[in-house]
Amino acid sequence: MASISEMSFWQRIIFLLQQYGSSYLKGAGTTLVIALVSTFIGCLIGFAVGIVQTIPLDPKRDSKVKRLLIQLSKILLKAYVELFRGTPMIVQAVFIYYGAAQVFDIHLGMWQSAFLVVSINTGAYMAESVRGGIISVDPGQMEGAKAIGMTHFQAMVNVILPQAFRNIIPQIGNNFIINIKDTSVLSIISIVDLFFVHKSVAGAYYTYFESATIVMAIYLTMTLIASKLLNLWERYLDGNDNYELVDKMDIGNQMHSAGRSAVR
Amino acid sequence: MSEKERILEITHLVKSFGSHEVLKDIHFSVDQGDVISIIGASGSGKSTLLRCINLLETPTSGSILYHGKDITDAKMNIYAYREKVGMVFQNFNLFHNLTVLDNCMVGPIKVKKKKKEEARELAMTFLHKVDMEQFINAKPRQLSGGQQQRVAIARALAMEPEILLFDEPTSALDPQMVGEVLNVMTTLAEEGMTMLIVTHEMAFARDVSSHVVFMADGVIEEEGSSEEVFGNPQKEKTKDFLSRFRNL
């Protein structure tokens, strides 16, 4: 076999794939797992924060204690959002992984740190997306819900959040794709993700360009598939444009069967 | 005439947005079975009055007595009150995420804690009444304005309210759809539903109402029976306003 310095560009790529193909795949798997889990947890955090941020306060009917508690949580959550949106994730990773051990004597494993950092980072971004999604729902929807006697909470669960959720799916997709790429900064805390594999492989044979080409192709494949799947999900949620008319003659018989109800 | 129960009694009602006083010292009452039309130019405070009545706007001062209890009192359970006071909006405000049937079932199930079967029967009864039972599987965005408004009326009725408030229910509709919706409202009035209607449909107000309230600049300028207000208006502002409607 020719030495690596005598190979052409494509030969080197094939060589790297033969030698390290499984390492690349494992790295990609790690990247995908961190991105998926963290985006999911981040969305949960985002929803929780966004919901709290949009609780209206009624100075007349809410007790002083309740108003104070809600106001306080809003301020704390706002601080959380600003802190994690306003600092680089790579610094947050170092801060939590090394800082927690040094200063607070909390020894987080690198996996725990990785999931934690990406989740709370996503949560900070999603919080604002969710808040935006909620306030972008037509105010008439909330009035309609209030007019039939719903509380703020009932209106949120049954009317507002389902509509807000549909509106922010593009944002969830955005964050997922960003997370697939940005987990690369976690190599700083020795997470063996796709980028970490690249650095090791490239360093071993000085094949920076070839390895980067492979890694870029893998990242792009992952994000393209993610983006396609998200589109399909959106279309699924939008449902069919058609609906069945119910035959008037059948109404009597169908009182108990017709019309699948989503209200449980 | 037999003694009718008083449902709402509004006294000294004032609503200001900042320094702008939209409602100035409003007094009026609603008895069971009344069909009251509130007419007047845009900006005269009609809609604000209606929105104050079910507390979508918080009155600045004054009281709204519901069966003798002041609902502007902070201790009143406004959710239980709103169950009893249905509202139909100019822009329908049907829940976009739910089908026609679910729009009419969600209130009875979630707010009144009715069983699903019972709620479905209620919903179907009222959807039949507004002639929309064929469309139970449709989403609001798939319906015309008139159809949406009829569903919105069914949704309000499914809560079995004591009184229904209509906030310009036909203003966003074309003439044919206006007819559809007014027919439904006329039927309700004939069946003895207590209704409070803000409207620009003067012929409807004249023919259907038991009582007419004319508002101008945040005050009730004139009120009386339909014959009195339309047939023989006393105030200049009322005459001037009604003179703009030639077909009366």
Image (tube, coloured by chain):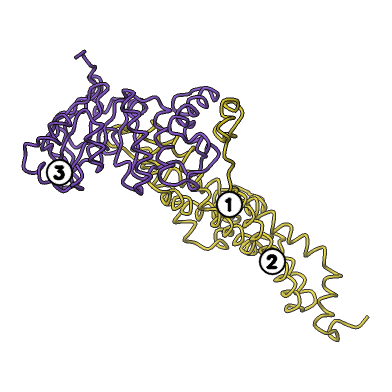
Q: Tell whether label 3 touches label 1 (CB within 8 Å).
A: no
**Quadrant in which residue B32 is drawn:** top left
Q: Is residue B163 left or right of residue A221?
A: left
Residue at screen point 55% across, 53% down: A169
Q: Is residue A72 left or right of residue A40?
A: left
Q: Which residue is mark 3?
A: B242
Q: Amino acid at mark 1?
A: Ser
Specify the colour of chain B: purple
The front one of A168 and A181 is A168
Q: Looking at the picture, how far across and down is residue B73, in whole percent?
A: 24, 27
- Mark 2, Cα crowd under 10 Å, few <14 / some 14-19 / many 20+, is some
Q: CA distance from mark 2 to mark 1?
A: 20 Å
Q: Amino acid at mark 2?
A: Tyr
Q: Amino acid at mark 3?
A: Leu
The front one of A33 and A227 is A227
> Which chain is home to disc 1?
A
**Image quadrant where one finds the C terminus of chain A:** top right
Q: Which residue is mark 2?
A: A219
Q: Looking at the picture, how far across and down is residue A158, in whole percent?
A: 49, 37
SS state under label 1: helix
Q: Which residue is mark 1?
A: A119
The front one of A115 and A35 is A35
**Residue at the bottom extreme, as displayed:** A6
> Which chain is home to disc 3?
B
**Residue at the top extreme, as displayed:** B2
Q: Looking at the picture, how far across and down is residue A4, in whole percent?
A: 85, 81
SS state under label 3: helix
SS state under label 2: helix
Q: Looking at the picture, how far across and down is residue B189, in whole percent?
A: 31, 28
**Quadrant in which residue B8 is drawn:** top left
Specify the colour of chain A: yellow
The front one of A161 and A222 is A161
